[in-house]
Image (tube, rainbow, N blue to C red):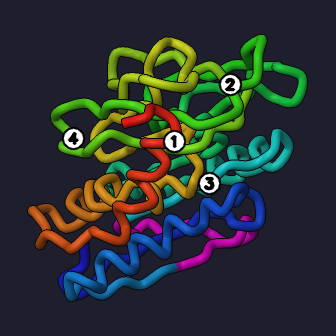
Amino acid sequence: MSSDRIKIVWIYPDLLSTYGDQGNTIVLERRAALRGIPTETVNLRSDEPVPADGDIYLLGGGEDRPQILAAQRLAGDGGLARAVQSGAVVFAVCAGYQLLGHEFGGEEGQPVAGLGILDVRSGRGEQRAVGEIVGDVAGELNVPRITGFENHQGVTELGPNARPFAKVLHGIGNGDGFEGAYGGRVLGTYMHGPALVRNPGLADLLLRWAVGHDLQPLDDSWAGRLRDERLSAVTGS
């Protein structure tokens, strides 16, 4: 991270930005600002090169054709891969999550090459997962129970260099009882919502990774209300 600000790069909003996923950038900006941490946000269109000097890179969901196009352009550009090698944080949702892996299912279910940044492989399942998802996050990440909205037909298998992000309590997630995956500072999830709006603790995880140290606690009475309401509506607790 640069000495005076966090650089957030929102990748390809013209291709990958369904279900309000770009709201994730707003949450990071706000939670950093409340702690006196300046941010710079770059909204990167798909015809622009990916800067390798970002601190946090965000990818959203998208339809099949935009997902394939995004994967091809990111592979050809190479900037995101270089940023990860330099220690950058990546948070990817749904289609963005799948294209970080080694391969994902295309328009007809055919395998399409991904970026190989996260050790996962995705394909097309028999049933579509639509609805609320709730999960308990891996303990080492120190993030409270998560809540989100999923809408996908993907199934994702983790390789030996990826770990499950959360154990599913309600919903489908990867299709194996777990939701999402992470490896190093790269984290993928099927959660829309937007995910960081519903889960401020997850936003703080990304910020902690970016700054390299613990963060000042915030009064989350308002931010936590939405999360608590969704958890109560789904789980009754």
Q: Mark 3 points at which residue?
A: 60
Label 3 and label 2: CA atoms lie apart by 15 Å
Across and down, in percent, residue 12 comes to: 67, 64
Q: Earlier in the sequence, mark 3 or mark 2?
A: 3
Tell me the residue at 34%/15% (across/down).
Answer: 160
Q: Mark 4 points at which residue?
A: 141
Magenta span of residues: 42-55
Q: What residue type is labelled 4?
A: Leu
Dominant SS of magenta comes to loop
Residue 52 lies in the magenta stretch = yes
Q: Name the residue under label 2.
A: 154
Secondary structure beneath dot 4 equals helix
- Residue 128 appears in the figure: yes
Q: Which of marks 2 and 4 is nearer the N terminus?
A: 4
**Camera-side residue of 226 and 73:** 226
Q: What residue type is labelled 3?
A: Gly
Would you place residue 211 above or below residue 39 in this image? above
Q: What residue type is labelled 2?
A: Gly
**Camera-side residue of 79 and 235:** 235
Q: Which of marks 4 and 3 is nearer the N terminus?
A: 3
Q: Earlier in the sequence, mark 1 or mark 2?
A: 2
Q: What residue type is labelled 1?
A: Ala
For the residues carrying marks 3 and 1, which lies nearer the camera in this image? 1
* Side of 152 where 165 appears, left or right: left
Would you place residue 13 above or below residue 70 in this image? below
Label 4 and label 3: CA atoms lie apart by 22 Å
Could you classify mark 3 by the number of other residues whose Cα lies within 10 Å: few (under 14), some (14-19), or many (20 or more)?
many
Tell me the residue at 66%/41% (across/down).
Answer: 95
- Residue 115 appears in the figure: no
Label 2 and label 4: CA atoms lie apart by 25 Å
Would you place residue 134 above or below residue 27 in this image? above
